[in-house]
């Protein structure tokens, strides 16, 4: 039997918390900086992300983590836990990296960390990765997401060309979670307030009822996996949009923590695509 290729351990980078900003009642922005970002760069994507690494209690290694050494010398239960977050912005002149976190009290791992972050706190992360940016050649753009996708949608709006035709829909719990976003003249976000409805229900209804403009659309649909699946089905089967024109992914799934969702996410995406191909 041929040997499996060894899994490459990505190089970790270190940074420090410079400050935090309370953007909305449940959104905290953490600004990272420090010498560890001296060689950090971003590409052309507006959904660039990094994987923050959190050491479990009892781990005695220091920032920035040497991931290869940790995996060789420590038992799995002492390996860092990673959480993926979109880069909200990167300023290469000041070398400041902004990351937005949805915070719901003590729920989760990264959110509570962001809420308690103090200047000087050390951070280890992997990345960046990414795969989407608005294409100036598209006739119009569709941006859809819940609050978890808001950083990427905000970054995309900032990079749209003047004169772009855009339909942008963001679902948040209530009006207090709306943000002032920068966009080309004539482009605005339609805010949908969830209230007591299931996550994404308002987004599914809005996209289904939207009168699509003429021409080729480039769509970005991200957020909770359940509503993402419904909109994906609608765009692919009912609207007939080719997969190449879509950036669609479930950032999270209701009822599953991040680790459980990441373990099945790829298989879930492949299953959804097979179902839609069979239904076409």
Image: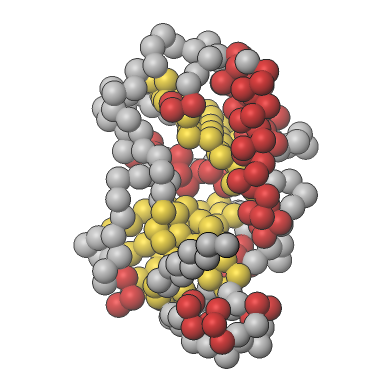
Q: Is residue 88 left or right of residue 193?
A: left
Position of residue 181 measured from the top left corner of the image (x, y, whole percent): 42, 40
Q: Nearer the viewer, residue 141 or 245?
A: 245
Q: Is residue 151 left or right of residue 261?
A: left
Vertical comparison of 138 with 72: above or below: above
Tell me if I can see residue 92 in this picture. yes
Q: Nearer the viewer, residue 18 or 124?
A: 124
Q: Residue at x 61, y 63 (%)?
A: 111
Q: Quadrant of residue 231?
A: top right
Q: Residue furthest front?
A: 1
Q: Residue furthest bottom?
A: 60
Q: Nearer the viewer, residue 42 or 97?
A: 42
Position of residue 86 measured from the top left corner of the image (x, y, whole percent): 47, 53
Position of residue 62 measured from the top left corner of the image (x, y, whole percent): 49, 87
The quadrant of the rendering that contains the C terminus is top right
Render colour scheme: secondary structure
Tell me if I can see residue 18 in this picture. no
Q: Residue at x 35, y 45 (%)?
A: 45
The quadrant of the rendering that contains the N terminus is bottom right
Q: Residue at x 64, y 47 (%)?
A: 265
Q: Nearer the viewer, residue 110 or 11?
A: 11
Vertical comparison of 123 with 216: above or below: below
Vertical comparison of 111 with 242: above or below: below
Q: Residue at x 53, y 11 (%)?
A: 211
Position of residue 202 measured from the top left corner of the image (x, y, whole percent): 67, 28
């Amino acid at each position: 039997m041929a040997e499996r290729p060894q899994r490459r351990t990505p190089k970790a980078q270190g940074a420090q918390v410079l400050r935090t900003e309370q953007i909305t009642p449940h959104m905290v922005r953490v600004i990272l900086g420090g010498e560890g970002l001296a060689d950090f760069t971003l590409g052309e994507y507006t959904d660039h992300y990094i994987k923050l690494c959190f050491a479990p209690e009892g781990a005695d290694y220091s920032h920035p983590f040497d991931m290869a050494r940790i995996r060789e010398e420590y038992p799995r239960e002492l390996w860092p836990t990673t959480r993926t977050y979109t880069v909200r912005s990167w300023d290469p002149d000041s070398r400041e990296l902004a990351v937005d976190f949805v915070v719901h009290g003590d729920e989760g791992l990264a959110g509570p960390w962001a809420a308690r972050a103090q200047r000087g706190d050390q951070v280890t992360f992997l990345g960046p990765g990414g795969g989407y940016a608005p294409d100036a050649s598209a006739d119009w753009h569709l941006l859809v997401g819940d609050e978890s996708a808001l950083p990427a949608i905000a970054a995309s709006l900032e990079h749209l060309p003047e004169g772009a035709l855009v339909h942008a829909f963001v679902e948040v719990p209530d009006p207090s979670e709306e943000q002032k976003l920068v966009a080309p003249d004539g482009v605005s976000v339609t805010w949908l307030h969830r209230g007591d409805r299931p996550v994404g229900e308002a987004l599914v209804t809005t996209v289904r009822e939207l009168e699509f403009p003429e021409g080729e659309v480039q769509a970005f649909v991200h957020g909770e996996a359940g509503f993402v699946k419904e909109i994906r089905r609608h765009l692919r089967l009912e609207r007939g949009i080719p997969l190449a024109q879509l950036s669609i992914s479930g950032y999270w799934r209701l009822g599953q923590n991040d680790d459980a969702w990441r373990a099945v996410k790829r298989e879930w995406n492949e299953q959804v695509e097979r179902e839609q191909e069979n239904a076409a």
